[in-house]
Image (cartoon, coloured by chain):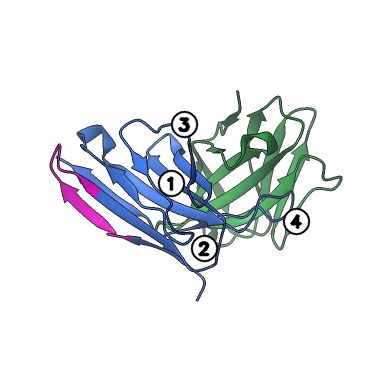
Chain colours: A blue, B green
Amino acid sequence: EAQVTQNPRYLITVTGKKLTVTCSQNMNHEYMSWYRQDPGLGLRQIYYSMNVEVTDKGDVPEGYKVSRKEKRNFPLILESPSPNQTSLYFCASSRELGLRTDTQYFGPGTRLTVL
Amino acid sequence: AQKITQTQPGMFVQEKEAVTLDCTYDTSDPSYGLFWYKQPSSGEMIFLIYQGSYDQQNATEGRYSLNFQKARKSANLVISASQLGDSAMYFCAMREDTGGFKTIFGAGTRLFVKA
């Protein structure tokens, strides 16, 4: 089954304790992205990747790191989480960019609480 | 700078009636794509419909159609014959072709379908 998986689905942590949220897709997609969703703000893009070893900042990259060492994986790293990073996080992937084929497939989401 | 505005935080519609969810956008890029996603209470993000800036016709996908008015920079989603299962959060999103995989989302509209 074609899918984007994220782990963990739920995480409660404390300020300053490094964490990683994993994202993996089995569709051989070139493009991957991380978003955070906050009430009243919709989804905001944190980072995206257009290929292995190619990443770029979205609108809200501060406090986050990413890496793309393999095509299928795109982990999100919070080196020193703070309470303002409490949010719902989505990973997404897309096969290609084009006028008709640019559909993003989303993972199930990771709800992160930083105390 | 690209921007997406959804001015309706919440809307009610009677079952079997049509409803229009508003989306306006701002971009200086002549080539871009517009998307609508549905997020039910279960939390997953579901792609609904896509419109390219150079598409001559409005996009349609089953009961969903996109009322694209390029000069007014609006991309309203029309849902015909509403069903109870259409109750969800709806997000409008845009990607500029010169922006790589950078994508912005509106704040969303919560739709309630009444029986």
Q: In this view, does A93 lie to the left or right of A20?
A: right
Q: CA–CA distance between discs 4 and 2?
A: 19 Å
- Residue density around tag 1, few if under 14, some if 14–19, many if 20 or more, within 10 Å: many
Q: Distance between the residues labelled 1 and 4?
A: 28 Å
C-alpha distance separating marks 1 and 2: 27 Å
Is B31 above or below relative to A106?
above
x then y, percent, for residue B84: 52, 62
Q: Which chain carries label 1?
A: A
In space, the residues marked 3 and 1 are separated at their CA atoms by 11 Å
Whether B100 is among the magenta residues is no
Q: Which SS class for mark 1? A: strand
Is label 3 in contact with label 2 (beta carbons under 8 Å)?
Answer: no
Q: Name the residue under label 3.
A: A59
State which quadrant residue A73 falls in: bottom left
Q: Which residue bears the numbered disc 1?
A: A34
Marks 3 & 2 on one chain = no
The quadrant of the picture occupied by the N terminus of chain B is top right
Number of other residues with Cα within 10 Å of mark 3, as a class: few under 14, some 14 to 19, many 20 or more: few
Residue B60 — which label? 4
Depth check, mark 1 against mark 2: the one in front is: 1
According to the image, label 2 marks what residue?
B85
- Secondary structure type for disc 4: strand
Mark 3 is on which residue type? Asp
Single out the mark in the foreground, 3 or 4.
Answer: 3
The stretch in magenta equals A7-19
- Secondary structure type for disc 3: loop
Q: In this view, does B40 lie to the left or right of B94?
A: left
Tell whether position A14 is magenta: yes
